[in-house]
Image (cartoon, rainbow, N blue to C red):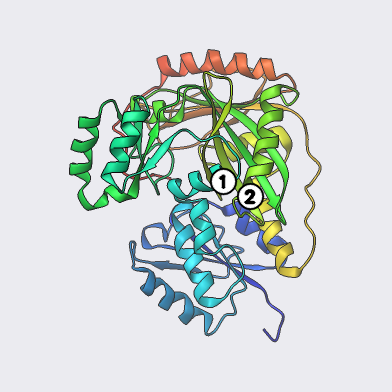
Amino acid sequence: MADGTRRILCIASYEKGQDFMRQCAELGVRPTLLTGDNLRDADWPRDILEEVMTMPADLALEQVIKTVTYVARGWKIDRIVALDEFDMEMVAALREHMRIPGMGRTTTQHFRDKLAMRFEAQRAGALVPEFSPVLNYDDLRAYMANVPSPWVLKPRAEASAIGIRKIHEPEQLWRTLDELGDRQSHYLLELFVPGDIYHVDAITSERKVVFSAVSRYGKPPMQVMHEGGVFTTRIVDRRGPDAQQLTALNAQLIPAMGMVRGVTHAEYIRGEDGRFYFLEVAARVGGAFIADVVEFATGVNLWAEWARIEVLSLRGEPYTVPATTQDYTGSVLCLARTAEPDTSIFDAPEIVYRMKKHHHAGLIVRSPDAERVRALLEDYSVRFAETYLAVQPVPNKPTA
């Protein structure tokens, strides 16, 4: 533009990414938001946004393209960013249509489609639980004959543990596929691998992972989602073998899957054989207050750093990771029976954050000692279950 204005269009189906937008504005780039009509009155940072535009939910891609390109007649759009995982494919299509730099549709599938990411991770040399596409029935029969049950039937494009079904024998699979009908090709079948689940939250700049935080869940997210319970996660001992192995594995895998720059949230499982297997990866900031856990431990705000990477790339300037701290943190979170649960009965000096979310109870603790964090979470998860825990059916789609 004649005045040199640079703009980033942010697209979000859920209320998130405020720190991303504020960081863009702080760096002199104008953020504009496109979201759903249902989020018109959400808590967006309106003081720094050039505009909040809304659209009806579930519009066809062609309608979204028409809307964004109409806006682009008057405003030059330099970058488009999907703040939520469910907007990634739409944003990739917009980038390709408008020839705006960023991840296109093929690479986006490596971070969005669970089948595509498994093939890519396997190609890159990572261990992956044995899996099969749900396409050819002879292939499925051969898979079930050679891979012992139980298996899990996973949606290829959902987030978290939504839509996952545990399958114990072939007839159960065939009945489930009959229920799915023409939707069955949007699933994959995978060996159920019991074990401890870890996640690596990372920043990549110019195809190099430059920051990683390795954490371990308490109960597996799939178990919490399907059976109810208290969710916990904590930063693991940075000097231990788990952190070192996963840091190295993730640093090799993420660039091999096509990530040039941005943030990722990857999950791995340590099987009963002691080896780490790739589970999934998303090109986004982790949910469930994981970004806060990382920030309290390291001082790194993943949303803000993602914005810095986008803006510096736009300007052709190099990115460097800010100085980090080396504390240990963890979170405990559960669905609560009351709308605004009171967590004041928990008063350890290590508590640094009390979550404010309707019908949820949650805390973040911090200590220079990883073992102290582990002990607090073990104690608090039991007490949360006794004091607050509510259970509801698994949702058909994410709620945040």
From the viewer's side, name the closer residue of 208 and 376: 208
Residue named by callout 2 = 256
The residue positioned 72% from the left and 42% from the top of the image is 211
Q: Local crowd at mark 2 within 10 Å, few (<14), some, or many (≥20)?
A: some
Name the side, left or right, on which 306 lies relative to 74: right
**Cα distance in 3D space between marks 1 and 2:** 9 Å
Q: Position of residue 1 (x, y in %)?
A: 67, 84
From the viewer's side, name the closer residue of 279 and 395: 279
For numbered disc 2, what is the local secondary structure? helix
Q: Position of residue 61 (x, y in %)?
A: 38, 69
Q: Image quarter for residue 226?
A: top left
Q: Is residue 357 above or below residue 66?
A: above
Name the side, left or right, on which 221 lies relative to 47: left
- Could you tell me how many numbered marks the image carries? 2
Q: Nearer the viewer, mark 1 or mark 2?
A: 1
Mark nearer the N terminus (1 vs 2): 1
Residue named by callout 1 = 123
Residue 306, visible in the rendered structure: yes
Say whether marks 1 and 2 touch (CB < 8 Å). yes
User: Which amino acid type is marked by label 1?
Assistant: Arg
Q: Image quarter for residue 86?
A: bottom left
